[in-house]
Amino acid sequence: MFAHEFGINRQKWRGFECLQNGRQPLICGDQIGVVRRFVLRLAFAHEINILLLASGRYNAPVPKPKGNVIDLRKKSNYRLDMKTKAINVISARRLAVLAVGALGAITIFATSMAEAATSKIVGHRAFYELKLGDRAQGAFITNVNGRSVFSVERECDGWRSVEDYMIQFFGEDGAADNLLSHFESWESDNGNMYSFDILEESTMDGRREFGGFVELGGDYSGNAFFSMEPDTPLILPSETLLPIRHVHQLLENAESGQKILGATLFTGNEPDNALMQTSTVFGGWRDAPASDLGQLGDDGYYQINIAYFQPSATTAEPRYEIQFAMQRNGLVREYEINYGDFSITAKLTSAESVNGPQCS
């Protein structure tokens, strides 16, 4: 939720004393005024409606980023509908952690693959149906229903991705808890700048929104800043990978036939969950033509499996694991998020191409 995400002209930085949009000052001193470009409207009763629109204004005191201001003027405009009941059976904050893990992962893969193979990757918007996968005996969650919409689009100096989730989690008594989540990110082509914006709404914890940005130096160490803790940056060690650089390495390994990759990855999340250690196992290429996808179809996909660990973890068990079936053009046919006692599967239902801008 920072100025470099919301259409502020990069020529308007004036020694960081004031940032202007046209003639209206938006940044003076340490105050960054952010134009909130979406509204989440929902009605929990018998129907949920998600409508993301350009609207509103939000102000947050945050540190001033260095370098160029990033322009993300285009926002998502999706509508998802689902019949549901608003009965709380699980902590919505826990649901938020679960969902953001998935959001960050999909964003990471699709945007980064586009950078790694620009001659083949295409911008696209993909629609998924979410269901309960495996479930351990005695697990609290008994069923999952949901939908998601993911898009990746080329910007002239980076990649932008957006993902919207709507998920119902059911308990043993059949009652449901509902989570709506919007995740948007941007990463520079050189992999040293990153910004993200998250909005969540749940039947238990209500509305939650935050954002952040990252700046890395020549050795890819640096700082991450968050809107909820603007004066407490997260220190990132050397060789921290942002999403695009991470998957560039993943693709190189997959194409060369290597099997394992370890990395330190900034995913975009709350401070306690933003920096992860990852361990990737490559399952190789699978021949599986997808003629039903039209021009977006490929003759197969890479099987990629990633385990995510918190750096301070003392256990060998990952926080979560994600398995992807990803085509060479960046389209994910399906994925599964494993949280240990249950998993969520996502099946592609449709996809469409998204054209990039004309860049000089």
Image (tube, helix red, strand yellow):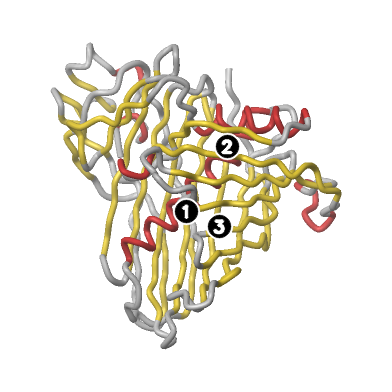
Residue type at numbered disc 3: Ile
Spatial CA distance of label 3 from label 1 is 26 Å
Looking at the rendered image, the quarter that the C terminus falls into is top right
In-front residue for pair 128/301: 301
Query: Quick check: marks 2 and 3 in contact, CB under 8 Å?
Result: no
- SS for tag 1? loop
The quarter of the picture where the N terminus appears is top left
Find residue 109 and report its horizontal and vertical position in percent.
59, 40
Q: Which residue is mark 1?
A: 77
Going by the numbered disc 1, the residue's amino acid type is: Asn
| Residue 272 percent coordinates (x, y) | 31, 43
Q: Quadrant of residue 23?
A: top left
- Which secondary structure, mark 3? strand
- Residue 132 vertical position relative to residue 103 in the rendered view, above or below: below
Q: Which residue is mark 3?
A: 337
Closer to the eye: label 2 or 1: 2
Residue depicted at x 53% and y 23%: 189
Q: Amino acid at mark 2?
A: Thr
